Image (cartoon, rainbow, N blue to C red):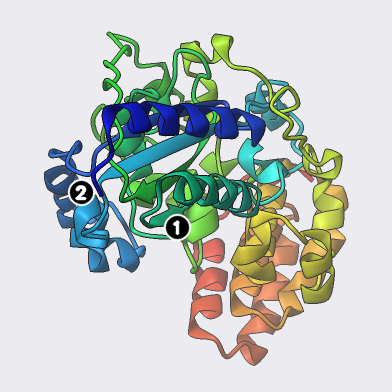
Amino acid sequence: MRTSTSDAAKLRALIDREAQRAGFDAVAVTTPDAIPLAPTRLAEFVADGFHGSMGWIAETLERRSEPAALWPEVRSIVVLAMNYGPEHDPRKLQAKCDRGAISAYAQNRDYHEVMKGRLKEIAGKIVARAGGDVKVFVDTAPVMEKPLAEAAGLGWQGKHTNLVSREHGSWLFLGTIFTTAELVPDTAEDDHCGSCRACLDACPTDAFPAPYRLDARRCISYLTIENKGPIPHEFREKIGNRIYGCDDCLAACPWNKFARTASEAKLVARADLREPPLAELLLLDDAAFRSFFTGSPIKRIGRDRFVRNVLIAAGNSGDFWLTASVRDLLGDASPLVRGAAIWALSRLVPEAEFAERAAAAAQTERDEGVRREWLVAQSNPIEMHA
């Protein structure tokens, strides 16, 4: 859709004004052909297997790497960002072993819900002013928001592969509006990481094989959220008390000193998710889980995966007051939960007690994966602190 220079300027002014009114912290414009390197980089990511079990990335490779392949009519892409910076360094919670560490973004209401309605309002104003058509995306379609945000000038993809902004640090939610209107694109942002490697060195599981490359299979966010099966043994201790996601690489970024906190950006974290007690989370059944996490992005992984994560944290806690709850979960209906409970118990009780329980389980357990957990835990006893 052809747009005159004057009309394009007025439309951009409207977009900027409406974005500010809707609570976005930054807005910029780019074109659908502005990320020419994205297809090759994404193909390498998939070819190396770094996407793990996230099969949808491979399945949507073409549409994901080229916006015009997703929607051929698109002429301009408006990228909007909302700051969710935490009030405190989230890494400090790792010292409280009896508490669960939840990624800062997940302490807020589900950002998909927060942003999508606001984006639709802005998109509606674009159509009302310029006509044509629009599509709105918030991380639920094959759109590469971070390269588009970089091309639009909102920031750059840092060595941790996340967007970094000189004004907002590493704490930005991103959304896009695809439009048939022709807008003047903004200038792409340069990379300002320099020789810094703070984010790479902060990763507990060495998930970065090289700067700007992430092996999701080693990432705690992937392991605790996207991974549907047992957490590999090699990462369990390194997960510590992180029960949903990991902020270490984001929190280490020096550019965060310029970031506003979420409360300043009108995003207020739930107080009960800032440092929830593991003892309470271990008691969640499916109904209680759904109720407690209403409106939270955590709800989408389901109770079993979440309790699996809590059990790993319990095993790392050294808190023997959790032992009774862990024992109870040995009889849980979910094999995923039972398997994680075995590992946690092996780290919380004396070896003799664990061996007795393993012998009893050998007579009743029918799930092969859970039986393997008993065998592995017995063959790799750790020093007990009871």
Q: Which residue is mark 1?
A: 232
**Which amino acid is tagged 1?**
Pro
Q: Which residue is mark 2?
A: 42
- Residue 176: x percent and y percent? 43, 45
In the rendered image of this protein, does residue 372 appear above or below residue 51? below
**Which amino acid is tagged 2?**
Leu
Q: Residue at x 26, y 36 (%)?
A: 213
Q: Nearer the viewer, residue 167 or 99?
A: 167
- Residue 22: x percent and y percent? 64, 36
Q: Is residue 352 left or right of residue 191?
A: right
Q: Nearer the viewer, residue 2 or 338?
A: 2
Q: Residues within 10 Å of mark 1 (few under 14, many from 20)?
A: few
Q: Residue at x 47, y 62 (%)?
A: 227
- Residue 32: x percent and y percent? 23, 44
For the residues marked 2 and 1, what is the alpha-carbon distance in whole angstroms? 25 Å
Element type at marker 1? loop
Q: Quadrant of residue 364?
A: bottom right
Dot 2 or dot 1, earlier in sequence? 2
Please tell me the numbered disc located at residue 117.
none
